[in-house]
Amino acid sequence: MSLVKELYEPYVLAARARVATEPVMRRVVDPAISPELLERFLLQYHALGVYIAEPLEGWNRRAGHRSLLLSLDTLGKSLLAHAKQASGLAQTMTEDVQVLVRRWNQRFQPVLHTERLLSQYPTDAMRSYRRLVEETLTGEFPSAQIAIEFESTLLTQMMGPHLLANVTRVLGREALEGLCALKAQSQPDAPRAVNQTRLMEELVRAMPENARTFAELSAEALELQLRFIEDCLESAEASLGTPVSASVA
């Protein structure tokens, strides 16, 4: 039996279950959501998400170096290799924002600007997420970054297919063009996801006595991710406080 399933998952399952029950998760996959709100949510999710994705490579690299210093050689080397896989996510999300902005501006008012969206001030949940990772990297178990990123990716795998299906229903298949990062992260067999699963097994195998600690830490990170998604929807709604009109061809 997988050590992750045996020693780690029992302490994070309750947090994972919230992905299906949180009102915000139900709303973004509801076919009744307005096209304007769904488009604006996607813009916020990607634009604000760059703030979380940008440090990923550095986080994994730092976790790898500290693990090596703690004589966790296998984990350290794996984290350093994984850092390279995480390097392109923020850039892909930025490119997706550019596509989504062009699509919005062709269909709706007011006109949006990529630079302004990307320079939005981070929400409390976003700052707390970064702070949690930073504290982990400088704490007793820097390699617990593996668990935090594992749950973040798993959240996208749980949400992504339903969200993408709703995008197709509400906005049309052509709207998937600007969702490259979301599509890639929604695939459980993607190389990065497969590597993260392997890293989790390595982590728990190396420190089975700390599996519960890792789970509690990643559950906290998952809670912050859910708050981030809620922030994206709330800010999208706030931006539509006045009627949004479709552009006249």
Image (cartoon, rainbow, N blue to C red):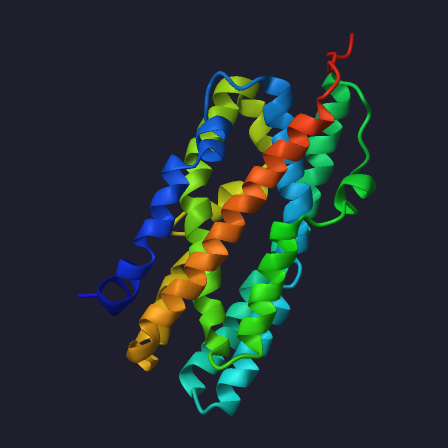
Percent x, y of residue 212:
33, 69
Judged from this view, the residue extending furthest toward the front is: 124
Viewer can see residue 191: no
Image coords of residue 70 (percent x, y): 48, 90
Q: Quick check: 44 left or right of 203?
A: right
Number of residue marks = 0
> Dividing the picture into quarters, in which one does residue 165 lie?
top left
Q: Would you identify the image quadrant in which residue 10 lies?
A: bottom left
Nearest to the observer: residue 82 or residue 146: 146
- Tell me which residue sits at (45%, 72%) in the image: 144
Residue 139 vs residue 196, the one in the foreground? 139
Pick the residue in front: 229 or 43.
229
Q: Where does the C terminus fall, quadrant-wise?
A: top right
Q: Indicate the position of residue 247 as horizontal and vertical percent values.
A: 77, 12
Where, quadrant-wise, is the N terminus in this rendering? bottom left
Q: Is residue 204 above or below residue 179?
A: below
- Report which quarter residue 53 is drawn in: bottom right
* Residue 72, placed above or below residue 79: below
Q: Residue at x 67, y 48 (%)?
A: 123
> Which residue is outermost to the top?
248
165 vs 45, left or right, is left
Name the one closer to the observer, 123 or 202: 123
Instruction: Please name the residue shown 77% across and 24% down the image.
Output: 105
Q: Would you place residue 168 above or below residue 78 in this image?
A: above
Q: Residue 98's x, y, as percent?
A: 73, 38
Q: Do we see residue 23 in this rendering?
A: yes
